[in-house]
Image: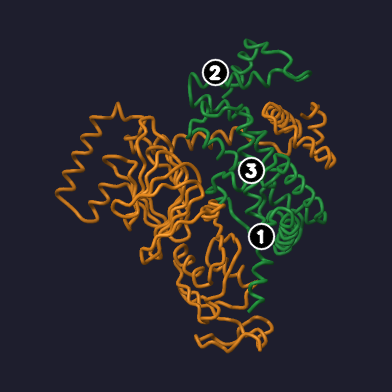
Amino acid sequence: MKDFSGRQKKKQEEITPPVAGSSPGEPSNELDSEILIRRAFEQNYDEAVELLFRWYYAPLCNHAIRYVSSREVAEDLVSEVFCTFYQERLFDKIDKSFRTYLFTSIRNKAFNYVRMEINRSASIEHAAMVPDPACQQPDEIVHYEDLYHDVDRVINLLPQRRRKIYIMHRLEGKKHEEIAGELGISVNTVKEHMYQALQQIRGYLREKWLPVTILFVVKLGGVWNLL
Amino acid sequence: MESALTKEEIFSYFSGRCTAFQKERIGNWVKDEKNRELFFKWLHEWEKKNVQYDVDVDAGLDRHRLWVASLKEQKAEHPVSPDTVAAGWSRRWITACMLLLAVLVTGGVFREKLLYKSYTTTYGEIQKVVLPDGSKVVLNANSVILVPRIGNNRDVRLKGEASFEVVTTPDRRRFRVLTSRNMQIEVLGTTFSVYSRASGERVVLNEGKVQLQYQKGKELEMQPGDMITVDAEGVLKVDYTPNPDQYTAWMFHRFVFEDLTFEKVGQQLEEVFGNRIVINDSLLAQQVISGSFTALDAEELLDFLKEAGDFTYEKTGDQLIIDSNGSSMNPDGIPDGIPDGIPDGDNGI
């Protein structure tokens, strides 16, 4: 694995400098990484995907967790993006940069996951089955930021203790028992806090992100009231 | 044309420190493809600077390698894939001859197993399948798709419900879906969904063009948004739906009902989840439901409906028995007796 980083650096030096000044003041090594990875695909497919993985896995997880607030889910979703990329040999099919493709995919996946989670307590298996359809996606790119900002806001709105428990459970992946032990409270209290936290988060996000659902309840109620 | 945005502006936008007006400006700016590349480049940079947690890349990579290895193993088990057609001709012939021989010797169900590779889902299960030709299929619950092992592997058979995303092959071979009632759908490459169960058949086209043969010699050409239904009696109807995606909502465990009677809703639940749904009140059974719901089992969906509708249900084994609720008699909504199928009078006075 070490040889990868070694090779990356070497090749970067070889490739400099690319087309200068596409945008002032930005480092050009970003552009290089894309060229470098693209070249790698001409040689060894598996290694090239691994290079891509090394380059983007961490930032993608870092991005996904802003939506899903769980390390495990974030990593599962990102892994899936790479699996799709690998299996469908997308390197010569996508007309944009790898970075744009990868970030767009993970944002779609994370977005769908949150939508599903606020609608119900879905497990990762179900998100895994969901392809990324155009129909479910927001029409504007800025909606993605809106969503993770809202997620962050609502987590911050939780009472401090509840927030701590939520983060320990979701982000750090600690079990209820572990958290109870660390904080010196009962397991049931931890569970109750988690339940309340999820209710609060879902309630907050639902209003804005599931307008369709709210609409149908009203409509449905209306039909039934006619009885 | 929007004026250029700086990296600092975008960074504070990522951090959630920008006004609604700035957001609007960024939204317009990013519509330009070149700007979008820049946007993601900056997002990448920003994410590297604003670490949420320490990601274990090596562990992730190990997992990825394991997955790649298992994928290769799978491929080794099924060596006849489109990429190896040229190289694998002789092996393919041997396999074909052996299969043919076996078919001649045996027969019946076994024959089907030999001739077709089948993908099956049980109740409540949704499966994504990549066919040997690269086309993608999402199979809804309680469905079977059969793919020929010999001959054209693009002649598939379907029982149940599935959504297809068909790829065009270099030699432009046709892709056909045959349903149990002799409906035949023929395409080159496109997206559509097919439903074929006891209660009828339905084809909805999302993209592209489709040739549909619904009886011997009778053909129809479908355009995107066209929906063709054949009911249990064999009566064919052509409709247009502005919203073809609603017919594939099941892929997300969603149910979309548009003015559907409770009875029909129950029928759908039976098909997908395998429960028997018994509605004890004929008035209730004819109630019309509209809306969309996400549910992983029948009870979850009934719970949703229960919130708005005036009924209770009870589970006994595989059966879900639904009774209308005498709400005035039962303010808690908890039935105190065991409903035995006798409707308990009118709703309200």
Q: Nearer the viewer, residue B72 or B38?
A: B38
The N terminus of chain A - image quarter: top right
Query: In the image, what residue occupies the spot 50% across and 85% down?
Result: B341
Q: Nearer the viewer, residue B123 or B270?
A: B270
Percent of width and height locating residue B63: 53, 37
The C terminus of chain A - image quarter: bottom right
State the mark number for residue A213.
Answer: 1
Q: Chain of mark 1?
A: A
Query: In the image, what residue occupies the spot 54% across and 18% down?
Result: A39
Numbered disc 1: secondary structure: helix
The answer to which of marks 1 and 2 sits earlier in the sequence is: 2
The answer to which of marks 2 and 3 sits earlier in the sequence is: 2
Please state if B234 lies on the left or on the right of A38 as rendered.
left
Q: Nearer the viewer, mark 1 or mark 3?
A: 1
* Chain given the colour green: A
Q: Residue furthest left?
A: B105
Q: Quadrant of residue A15?
A: top right
Per the model, the C-alpha gap separating discs 2 and 3 is 29 Å
Which residue in the structure is indicated by mark 2? A39
- Labels 1 and 3 in the same subunit: yes
The colour scheme applied to this rendered structure is by chain
Q: Using a 10 Å C-alpha cutoff, classify the residue at mark 3 as few (fewer than 14 neighbours), some (14 to 19) or many (20 or more).
A: many
Q: Chain of mark 2?
A: A
In the rendered picture, chain B carries what hue?
A: orange
Which residue in the structure is indicated by mark 3? A74
